[in-house]
Image: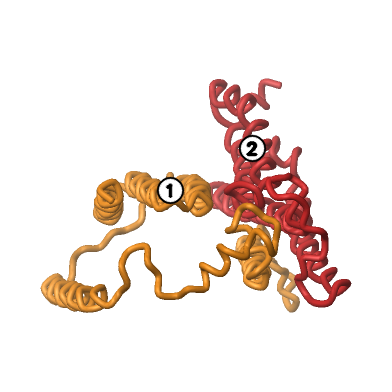
Chain colours: A orange, B red
Amino acid sequence: MLDLYILLIFIIVAAAIAVETKDLLSSVIALGATGLGLSLTFLVLKAPDVAITQLIVEILSLIILIRATMKEDLPFSTSGRWLVNTVITVCFIFVFIFTAVKCFKELPQFGYPTIKTSSAYLKEGLKDTGATNLVSAVILDFRAYDTLGEAAVLFTAVIGVLTILRRKGRKNEETGLDNE
Amino acid sequence: MNNEKDKGMSLIVKTVTRLTAGPIFLYGIYILSHGHVSPGGGFVGGVIIALAFIQLMLAYGKESAFKKLPRAAASFIENLGALMFLALAGLGFTGGYFLLNFIGKGEPFRLFSAGIMPLYNIAIGVKVGAGLFAIFIALILLRINREDDR
C-alpha cells in the first residue's frame, strides 16, 4: 500500500510541474513522467494489460507532442483579473475537497467492489471462452460489441485527422483556385 | 548518396534504429498474437508496430519510411483491418448470432486456442497500427509544410 501512495504523490508532483513550468518541452517531459507513474500504479494494482497499454500509448503521445512543440512557443498570459481568478479557484478547490470527503466515506473498501458481475466472469471465463487472459476474454468475447464500437471510434478519428490535415484543400468549384 | 545521408538524424541514431526497429516490430507481433494467453492484445501490439515505423521515420527521414509503408497503403490497411473485424463478427451468423465465438475453444495456454479471439486481435492490431501511423504521418507532413511556408 505504501508504494501506491509514493507513486500517487509522484504523479501529483509531476502533474503540477507539467502545468506550472514555463518551458514547453519540460512540460511535455513532465507529462511523460506522469504517465510513467500511472502505468507503474497499474502494475502495482496487478493490471499488467492496462500498464502495457498506458506505457506504450504514453511513449507514442510523448513522441508526437515533442515533435509538435519543438519549435513552437505558445503565448502564456497570466495578466488580467488575478484576484477574481484566485478567489474562484480557491472556492472550487474547497467545494471539490468537501464533496470528495463526503463521497469517499460512502465508497466500499479498497479491493471489495459492490458490483458482483466480475466474479461471474472470473469463475466462468476460462470455461466459456478458452482464453487464459481474462481481459482479452472480456473485451473480445463477453463485451465484443464495445470493442467493435471502439474500432469504429478510432476509424472515425483517423478519417477526421486525415481530412483536416490533408496537404491540399479541395479546389473551389466556382473560381477553380486552391481553397487554402 | 551523400544527399541521402543528410536526411534524418545522426549516424548513431541511424545505427541504433537499424538494430532495434526489427526487434520492436517482432515484439509487436508477439504481443499481438499472444493477446489471449498473456497480457497484451490487439491494441498494444498495433501501437508497438506503429512505433517501429515511427522510429524508422524519425531516424531516416520520411522518404525512407514511405518506401517501406506508403501513406496510401497505411490508409488502405487501416480500412482492411476494420472490415476484417466486421467480417469476422458477421461470420458469427453461421453459428447463430453476431460476434459469436464459432471456432472451437481448444486447449488453454496454447497459441491456437480461444476460438476466434486471435483473429480478432490480429484485425484490431492491423487497424490500430496502420491508423496511428497514418495520424503520425498527417501531423508530421503538416509541420513540414508549415516550415516550408515560413
Relative to B1, residue A58 above or below: below
Task: Estimate the x, y position of residue A102 in percent, counting from the top left.
Answer: 21, 78
For disc 2, the marked residue is: B27
Say what secondary structure mark 1 lies in: helix
Task: Estimate the x, y position of residue B71 in percent, counting from the top left.
Answer: 73, 50
Q: Answer whether residue B84 is visible to the viewer in this image.
A: yes
For disc 1, the marked residue is: A43
Q: Image quadrant of residue A81?
A: bottom left
Q: Amino acid at mark 1?
A: Leu
Residue at 56% over, 69% down:
A120
Task: Estimate the x, y position of residue A75 in percent, counting from the top left.
Answer: 32, 58
Parent chain of label 2: B
Q: Answer whether residue A24 is visible to the viewer in this image.
A: no
Q: For marks 1 and 2, give the CA distance.
A: 20 Å
Residue at 69% over, 64% down:
A128
Count of marks, rendered view = 2
Task: Estimate the x, y position of residue B94 in percent, counting from the top left.
Answer: 88, 72
Q: Would you call the spot at circle 2 few (<14 residues within 10 Å), some (14-19), or many (20 or more)?
A: some
